[in-house]
Amino acid sequence: MTEALVLRRSPQPATFLVAGGMLLAPITGTSSTLGSPSDTRYSGLSMTQAGYAVAPLPTGSVADEVSALQEQIRSRASLTRQQIARALGVDRRSLSAWASGSTRPGLRRLDALRFLAQLVRDLDARHPGRVHELLLAVHSGNRDALSMIAEGRFDVAWRLAKTAKGRPVISITRITRTKPPVYAAAARALREGRLDRPVPSRTVRNQDVYEMDLAEALLFEEEPQEEPRRSGYR
Amino acid sequence: MITPEDFYSPTEGPLKQGDILLAGVSRLVAEDRFCPAQWDAVEEHVVTVELAKADGSALRVGLGPALVMVTSHDCHLDKGWNRRRRELLDQGLSEHEAAEEAEHDMSLDRTFLASPLIDPDELNVERGNLMAGRMVGYLPVPASLDGLVPESVVDLTYRCTLDRLDMVRVGCVSNGVRAQLRYALARLDSLRATQLGFEAEAVLGQSITNVEFPTRNPLLVRIHLENGTSVDLLQHPAEPAEAPSRSVAPPGRDA
């Protein structure tokens, strides 16, 4: 199965370079309280319906797949057939008919079922024992994850299930130290109004200061080193 | 270790590489919240943000207030302003108008890099070598005479992007210390081999009589040849040549 989770960031992707290797990793830093007026990098995390792609089960008929997914959902999330049917926007008899092979679900319904199964697996892995509660938690507008799946709004369903009531979105842990910090005297000076920001003042520089020629990187070539002895991270 | 008199310079002028600030630092941490011992005192808080990672799991950031040293070069601190000024000049504005308009753009040159000052006792290394500046990744800092900065080391392996509107300045350092900082940064990030092979002799067709690491230009490796000439093998990342005018202050403010 493939999750099409998309972290909406612009203009830079969430990657950085370490020792010549590209990693996918988050980035961090601090920002002023004024913020940057055009900074839209943290506009949110979503699972886009357009980008969502789930491979069908490799063998068997659609009926077999529906039966298998339904069973997974029932066993991991303790959802009733009625609740699963609600998430697919159909009635319970339609679901039974798909499982028996007497009728076939449309592609949109089948995708919804596959998404629900994927969401259940993910929630079960992260929050064992809470899947049922997270899927059925009622949010503003009387919405829950199942109703959003029925509307085809998988990204919203994903977000609702993961932000169910009782789970804090942000938590802060303060670590108490016994030793005075390195910044103690400076912090006291700041409180006493003795420290300021530097006065803005610029230096005119020629454009070539900001240009470089990567051909000069030859100066920094290194001899091949021994094979690393470290086998990897735990 | 360098004396405070040689290390510090008067706290004045624009933000510069080497300036010591009171700001904050942050670092992403893993689920087990592991923090190397030397940074334990730097990260007073751990903030967990649910759903913040691409797979829907939580992001955790260790952060806290800290004394930091600016590691970005002075050129970086003016980069956006110079680019904007050139654009405005191309549009026909006068020198004064272009400089003034660029100065009023609060989005320019907001960010820079800095590394925290940490207590040398927190590092599990030989203190003598550390404070003598012989350990790659660290720059020793003597206690300042005004008492605002205790004896410490700049941990260059911890680097953080800061906002220039979110800090205050505690001190400035001398030009010699700024050169030491650049050397320490280069040794940490890119310059592992300062030993030069004698293959150079074959290339040059001359015997090398001496190899010099000028103390005032520590990144420069100067090879003296038997014919009396010398070759500089690496360009020291020095200050750029001064342009015709300097220090354009915003209206109503002294530079």
Image (cartoon, coloured by chain):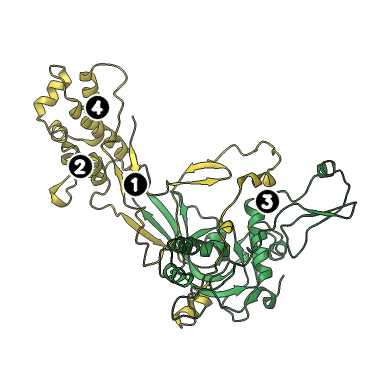
Write down the residue under mark 3. Answer: B191
- Kindly give the residue lying farthest to the right in the view shown: B226
Which badge, 1 or 2, comes first in the chain's sequence? 1
The kind of residue tagged 1 is Arg
The mark total stands at 4
> Which residue type does callout 2 highlight?
Ala
Number of residues whose C-alpha sits closer than 10 Å to that of mark 4, classed few (under 14), some (14–19) or many (20 or more):
many
Question: Which residue in the structure is indicated by mark 4?
Answer: A69
Badge 4 marks a residue whose secondary structure is: helix
Mark 3 neighbour density, 10 Å: few (under 14) some (14–19) many (20 or more)? some
Instruction: Report the mark closest to the observer, 4 or 1.
Output: 1
User: Cα distance, mark 2 to mark 3?
Assistant: 54 Å
* x and y, in percent, of residue A155 in the image: 25, 42
Distance between mark 4 and mark 2 Cα atoms: 17 Å
Q: What is chain B's hue in the picture?
A: green
Q: Which chain does tag 2 point to?
A: A
Q: Is residue A112 left or right of residue A92?
A: right
Q: Residue at x 51, y 41 (%)?
A: A22
Q: CA distance from mark 3 to mark 4?
A: 56 Å
Callout 3, which amino acid? Leu
- A165 to B76, vertically: above or below: above
Chain on which label 3 sits: B
Decide: is B83 above or below A189. above
Q: Residues within 10 Å of mark 1 (few under 14, many from 20)?
A: some
Q: CA distance from mark 4 to mark 1?
A: 30 Å
